[in-house]
Image (cartoon, grey):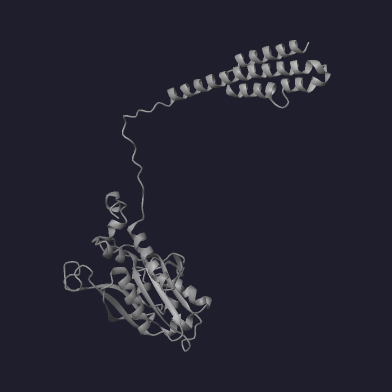
Amino acid sequence: MMKEKLEQIKAEALRQIEASDALEKLNEIKVNYLGKKGELTAVLKSMKDVAPEDRPKVGQLVNETREEIEKVLEASVKKMERAVREAKLKTEVIDVTLPSKKNKMGHRHPNTIALEEVERIFIGMGYEVVEGPDVEKDYYNFEALNIPADHPAKDEQDTFYITGDILLRTQTSSTQVHEMEKGKLPIRMIAPGRVFRSDEVDATHSPSFHQIEGLVIDKHITFADLKGTLAEFAKELFGEDTKVKFRPHHFPFTEPSAEMDVTCFKCGGKGCRFCKGEGWIEILGCGMVHPHVLEMSGIDPEQYTGFAFGVGLERIALLKYEIDDMRLLYENDIRFLKQF
């Protein structure tokens, strides 16, 4: 009786294996017949109804049936896997004689490389990098920086006005005003960002470019601090032998004001084509923060002093990489950009 039942189970299992056309179905058969709740397990559980002397014989028959089903099942799985693999190889033919596709990796823009280097230098001096809005109020861009209503810089030929009071910032100094108004002193910050001026596009001008403005406000800050900081910055950026020169200048938001030159890093100050024979290259504008600017932002000029400076990011990139036309930075010519 038990032997006939096992023969029946085996025959049905083999028939189902033969009829299967997918690996999933073979897996179902394995679970149904050999699993914990399968047919053969059920037979083993009914052994209690078999006479004790017949149990070893029945157990042997169950194991033999299991082995035969497993053997056929394994052979069918291997055969089916092979068929699936062969079908896949036919549909995924690779011509190994074709040239491989080059993996083109991008990299940072020369402007970004120059900006990150400047940020690294000033962060190393304990400065914070602060960003501000590109669209700014006239107050923050001009009034709070001691630039009155009748100043020529506020003319529409120089500045992009959106409304009478809203404009595209012409300098990132506006970010400094926002920081000063917070009243958290001392301040040591640089403000990099895009600025906009109504300029015609040529080799040295663009209606959109980038600036890095710096500001330090604390007690007992003097022009000596300004000179020492910017001299160190120039050495870090252009080389240890770089010397600096300060020339008197005028900016509405600083007093006294200066423009700073660095010795030409091509000729070391001797004079060459790169520095137009002068030995010096103008690099940035700077000065001590005007007392009125401090007052307008709620800082007591009797208690605090500070210095500010501004440098064009493109100017640094052009000098650093000896590029003679600013337009090359924006034209996205891959032949130019991949050199960096």
Residue 138 placement (x, y as % from top left): 45, 72
User: Which quarter of the image is occupied by the C terminus?
Assistant: bottom left
User: Residue at the location (38% across, 69% down)?
Assistant: 121
Residue 97 placement (x, y as % from top left): 31, 29
Q: Is residue 255 visible?
A: no
Instruction: Determine which quarter of the picture holds residue 168.
Output: bottom left
User: Residue at the location (60% across, 14% down)?
Assistant: 18
Instruction: Determine which quarter of the picture holds residue 4.
Output: top right
Which residue is at the front of the view, 130 or 33?
33
User: Which quarter of the image is occupied by the N terminus?
Assistant: top right
Q: Is the residue 200 above or below the residue 87 in the image?
A: below
Q: Is the residue 175 above or below the residue 92 in the image?
A: below
Which residue is at the front of the view, 320 or 124?
124
With 205 as the anchor, is 88 left or right in this view?
right
> Most extreme residue toward the front, as rendered?
53
User: Residue at the location (41% across, 80% down)?
Assistant: 146
> Most extreme residue toward the bottom, as rendered?
302
User: Residue at the location (43% across, 86% down)?
Assistant: 220
Which residue is at the front of the view, 97 or 326?
97
Residue 37 placement (x, y as % from top left): 73, 26
Q: Is residue 191 visible?
A: yes
Q: How many marks?
A: 0
Q: Is the residue 317 above or below the residue 289 in the image?
A: above
Residue 307 placement (x, y as % from top left): 40, 80
